[in-house]
Image (tube, rainbow, N blue to C red):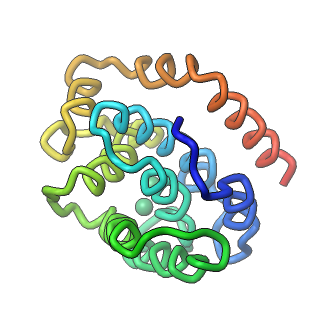
Amino acid sequence: MKSSSIDFKKLWKIVISNKDRIDSRVHGPEHWVRVQRNGLYICKQNNVDEDIIRLFALFHDSMRQNDGRDSQHGLRGAEYAKLLLNKEYKLADDKFELLYYACQYHSKHRATEDKTIGTCWDADRLDLRRVGIKPTEKYLYSDAAKLIVKENKWRRLEQKISNTSRFTNWWKKLLNYINML
Ligand SMILES: [Fe+2]
Ligand SMILES: [Fe+2]
């Protein structure tokens, strides 16, 4: 994991503590952690900005109001990211534009030519299995994500990341924190 100027631990605590979000196992922090894990795995092969991926994982479902049909949750998540920008974290304008777009449209089944946005959406879709849905290759952007689906190599996501001790330590601490809430 590359070093970042963003204090992600602080940011996660702020977003997790936000009272406007629903408490959900399907769309809550445990899902966000897996989206980040998936995104960082794809990142290694796509060479995209890790900060955007990590911010997307954190914000994209952060303002869901229910686990069902909530068509505006992406937009609300994008606006929440905007609200905290320059207060709790900094991001260059061009990068924030990508983050905002990725959050706003992540559930709108759009196609994208942008590898950063594509990586964000792949990371989210690769976690569809939590609700019993196998992602469809044609809705994925990156070769790395398509290969996992095509060859049923789901353990690859776990194994690659578990080799990164810094990440797993951080992840374990985060899960402990979530369990304390
Ligand atoms: Fe979503
Ligand atoms: Fe999601």
In this rendering, the answer to whether 37 lies above or below 107 is: above
Q: Quadrant of ligand 1?
A: bottom left
Picture coordinates of residue 72 (x, y %)?
A: 40, 78
Residue occupying the point 41% across, 41% down: 39
- Residue in the foreground of this view, choosing between 60 and 87: 87
Residue appearing at x 21%, y 61% in the figure = 109
Judged left or right of residue 54, residue 138 is: left
Left or right for 84, reference 127: right
Horizontal and vertical percent position of residue 84: 61, 77
Q: Front-most of 126 and 58?
A: 58
Which image quadrant is residue 135 in? top left
x 73%, y 33%: residue? 172
Look at 43% across and 57% down and name the residue there. 52
Above or below residue 32? Residue 173 is above
In the rendered image, residue 62, in percent from the top left (x then y), is placed at 56, 66
Q: How many badges with numbers are in the image?
A: 0
Residue 8 position, x and y percent, is 65, 54
**Would residue 59 be found to the left or right of residue 39 on screen?**
right
**Image: 105 above or below 48:** below
Q: Quadrant of the C terminus?
A: bottom right
Quadrant of the rendered image containing residue 78: bottom left
Extreme-right residue of the structure: 180
In depth, the one of 115 and 137 nearer the eye is: 115
